[in-house]
Image (tube, rainbow, N blue to C red):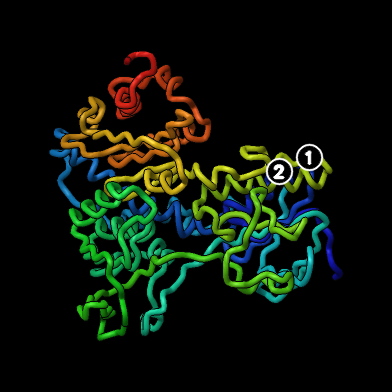
C-alpha cells in the first residue's frame, strides 16, 4: 500500500489530541488520530482521574469527621479494596471502548500503532502486529504525545524498579511503607492518598513543597501531611539507593537512611519526544518542543506541538485549552482565513502565561490562578496583597467545625484588577473559577463590588477582600 494523504494527522489520542482532532474535524478537515496505547491517554487512566479517585474517599471521610453529628456516624476506617475498585470503575478498568465510540461519532479516524516521522508532513505508523501504514498530511501534523517521568540520577535507584505516577495510580494494594521522592503536586497528592489508604509514607523533597505556589499554601500542605502521619523531609537529597531483603534503602545526604517497601519517583516530567523521529525534522528528541502562541513550531508552517509535550503548562485542562486554539488555527490556515493571533485571540493560548488555574487535591486543598505575590513582583507590577482567614466567614463556620483556611488576592494597583488568587482550605477548588474569570477578564475591582456573594458561603471572601482594599469614593 502506498502513502495515504489526509488533511491532518494528530499523534496521540489523549485528551489533548482528541480536542485537536475534534476542532479540525469540525473545521471540515479529514483528520486521522494515531494512538499506540489507550484512547483517552494519561489523564483518563493513569493521572487525573485515577489519582483523584484514590484521593476522594479520604477527603470525604475527613469532611464527615469535621462536622458534629456526622462525625458520630463515622465508625470505621477506609476500605482500601473498595477505594481501588471504585478507581477501576472510574477508569473503566482501563478499557477505551467508550472513547473509541466517541471518536467514531465525531468522525475522527483512529489508527492504532506507534507513529514516527519519516520526513516533512510524513508519518509511518507501526501496529503491534507489525502492520505499517504511511500517512502524509496536506495541512498539518499535531504532536500531542504528552510527557514522561524523569528519573533522577541517583546511583542504584533504577535497579529498585521504582514506581512512577502510573504505577501508583494503577496499583491494586497499598504498600506497608512508601517513600515518595518529590515535593510537587504529584508527590504531595499521592503521599496524601496512600497515607489515607494505610501506608506509612515518607516524602523527600530536594527543596520545599509545591514550588511556585504561595509559601503559606506549602506550609499548610506540609502541616496536613504531617497530621496524616506522613514524615516530610525537605531540603534533602537522596544520594544513593539499593535493595535489602524486602525493602528499598535510600541514603540521604546527611548519611541517614530510609527503608521502604516501595519507592515512588515524582521528581518531574519531560516531553515524550523520543522515538518519534523528530530528528528527521531537525528537532532534538527527548525534550519539550518549543511553540508559538498558536502552538505551531517555529520554522514549520505545518507542525504543531500541543499539551505537555511543549512544556508550557503541564495540566490537562490547560492542554485542552491549547488544543482548541491549535485545532481552530489549523482549520483557519487550511481554509485561507485570517488567524487571530493577538493576545486573547481565538487562535492563541494567552492564558498559559499569566492565568493558569490549578487545584492540588491535598488536605487542605490548594487552588490558585495567575501570579503569586512573588511572581507579580518579579514581573515588575506595583501590587497590593490582600490576605483573609477563611475561618472568619459565616459560611466556613457552617461548612465544618474548626474550619481552617486562607485566601490571598494579588491586585495590580495601576490597572485596578486582580492578577492572582490563592485559596487554601476544604474544597476550595470550587472557588477557583470565579477568580479565573476575574483574572482573565481583567474585571475592575470597582465592578466586583456589584458581584454580590451569596450568604452564608465561603465565596463571601470576595467581599472581605474588597472591604480590605477599600471602595473608591468612600474615603478622603
Q: In this image, 439 relative to 391: left or right? A: right
Q: In this image, 263 relative to 316: left or right? A: left
Per the image, label 2 sits on a secondary structure element best described as helix
Residue pointed to by mark 1: 338
| Residue 152 position in % (x across, y down) | 41, 74
Q: Residue furthest front?
A: 476
Q: Residue furthest right?
A: 2
**Counting other residues with Cα less than 10 Å from the Cα at mark 2, is it few (<14), some (14-19), or many (20 or more)?**
many
* Foreground pick, 389 / 359: 389
* Foreground pick, 308 / 383: 383
Q: How many marks?
A: 2
Q: Quadrant of the C terminus?
A: top left
Front position among marks 1 and 2: 1
Residue 426 in sight from this viewpoint: yes
Q: Which mark is residue 328?
A: 2
| Residue 398 position in % (x across, y down) | 22, 28
Which image quarter: residue 12?
Answer: bottom right
* Foreground pick, 358 / 15: 358
Discs 1, 2 touching: Cβ within 8 Å: no
Vertical order, 65 against 85 (above or below)? above
* Foreground pick, 86 / 3: 3
Vertical order, 202 against 326 (above or below)? below
Per the image, label 1 sits on a secondary structure element best described as loop
Q: In this image, 39 relative to 191: left or right? A: right
Residue 101 in sight from this viewpoint: no
Q: Quadrant of the N terminus?
A: bottom right
Residue at 30% over, 26% down: 468
| Residue 383 position in % (x across, y down) | 40, 37
Amino acid at each position: 500500500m502506498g502513502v495515504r494523504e489526509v488533511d491532518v494527522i494528530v499523534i496521540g489520542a489523549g485528551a489533548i489530541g482528541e480536542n485537536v482532532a475534534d476542532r479540525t474535524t469540525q473545521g471540515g478537515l479529514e483528520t486521522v488520530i494515531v494512538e499506540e496505547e489507550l484512547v483517552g491517554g494519561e489523564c483518563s487512566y493513569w493521572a487525573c482521574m485515577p489519582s483523584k479517585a484514590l484521593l476522594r474517599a479520604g477527603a470525604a471521610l475527613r469532611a464527615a469527621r469535621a462536622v458534629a453529628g456526622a462525625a458520630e456516624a463515622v465508625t470505621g476506617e477506609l476500605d482500601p479494596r473498595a477505594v481501588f475498585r471504585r478507581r477501576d470503575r472510574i477508569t473503566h478498568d482501563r478499557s477505551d471502548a467508550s472513547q473509541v465510540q466517541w471518536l467514531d461519532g465525531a468522525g475522527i479516524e483512529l489508527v492504532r500503532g506507534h507513529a514516527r516521522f519519516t520526513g516533512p508532513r510524513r508519518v509511518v505508523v507501526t501496529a503491534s502486529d507489525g502492520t505499517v501504514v504511511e500517512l502524509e498530511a496536506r495541512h498539518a501534523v499535531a504532536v500531542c504525545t504528552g510527557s514522561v517521568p524523569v528519573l533522577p540520577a541517583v546511583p542504584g535507584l533504577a535497579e529498585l524498579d521504582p514506581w512512577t505516577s502510573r504505577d501508583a495510580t494503577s496499583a491494586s494494594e497499598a504498600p506497608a511503607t512508601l517513600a515518595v521522592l518529590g515535593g510537587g503536586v504529584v508527590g504531595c497528592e499521592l503521599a496524601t492518598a496512600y497515607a489515607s489508604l494505610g501506608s506509612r509514607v515518607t516524602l523527600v523533597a530536594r527543596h520545599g513543597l509545591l514550588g511556585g505556589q504561595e509559601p503559606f499554601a506549602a506550609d499548610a500542605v506540609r502541616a496536613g501531611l504531617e497530621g496524616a502521619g506522613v514524615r516530610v523531609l525537605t531540603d534533602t537529597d537522596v544520594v544513593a539507593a539499593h535493595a535489602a531483603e524486602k525493602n528499598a534503602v535510600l541514603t540521604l545526604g546527611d548519611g541517614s537512611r530510609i527503608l521502604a517497601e516501595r519507592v515512588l519517583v515524582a521528581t518531574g516530567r519531560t516531553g515524550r519526544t523520543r522515538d518519534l523521529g523528530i530528528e528527521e525534522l531537525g528537532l532534538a528528541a527527548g525534550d519539550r518542543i518549543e511553540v508559538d502562541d498558536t502552538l505551531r513550531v517555529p520554522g514549520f508552517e505545518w507542525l504543531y506541538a500541543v499539551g505537555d509535550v511543549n512544556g508550557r503548562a503541564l495540566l490537562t485542562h490547560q492542554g485542552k485549552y491549547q488544543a482548541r486554539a491549535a485545532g481552530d488555527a489549523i482549520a483557519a490556515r487550511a481554509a485561507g482565513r485570517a488567524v487571530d493571533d493577538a493576545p486573547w485571540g481565538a487562535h492563541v493560548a494567552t492564558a498559559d502565561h499569566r492565568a493558569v488555574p490549578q487545584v492540588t487535591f491535598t488536605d487542605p486543598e490548594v487552588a490558585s490562578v495567575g501570579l503569586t505575590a512573588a511572581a507579580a513582583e518579579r514581573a515588575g507590577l506595583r501590587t497590593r496583597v490582600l490576605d483573609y482567614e477563611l475561618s472568619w466567614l459565616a459560611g466556613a463556620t457552617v461548612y465544618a467545625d474548626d474550619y481552617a483556611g486562607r485566601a490571598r488576592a494579588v491586585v495590580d494597583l495601576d490597572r485596578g484588577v486582580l492578577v492572582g488568587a490563592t485559596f487554601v482550605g476544604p474544597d476550595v477548588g470550587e472557588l477557583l473559577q470565579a477568580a479565573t474569570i476575574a483574572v482573565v477578564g481583567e474585571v475592575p475591582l470597582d465592578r466586583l463590588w456589584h458581584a454580590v456573594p451569596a450568604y452564608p458561603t465561603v465565596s463571601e471572601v470576595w467581599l472581605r477582600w474588597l472591604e480590605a482594599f477599600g471602595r473608591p469614593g468612600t474615603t478622603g
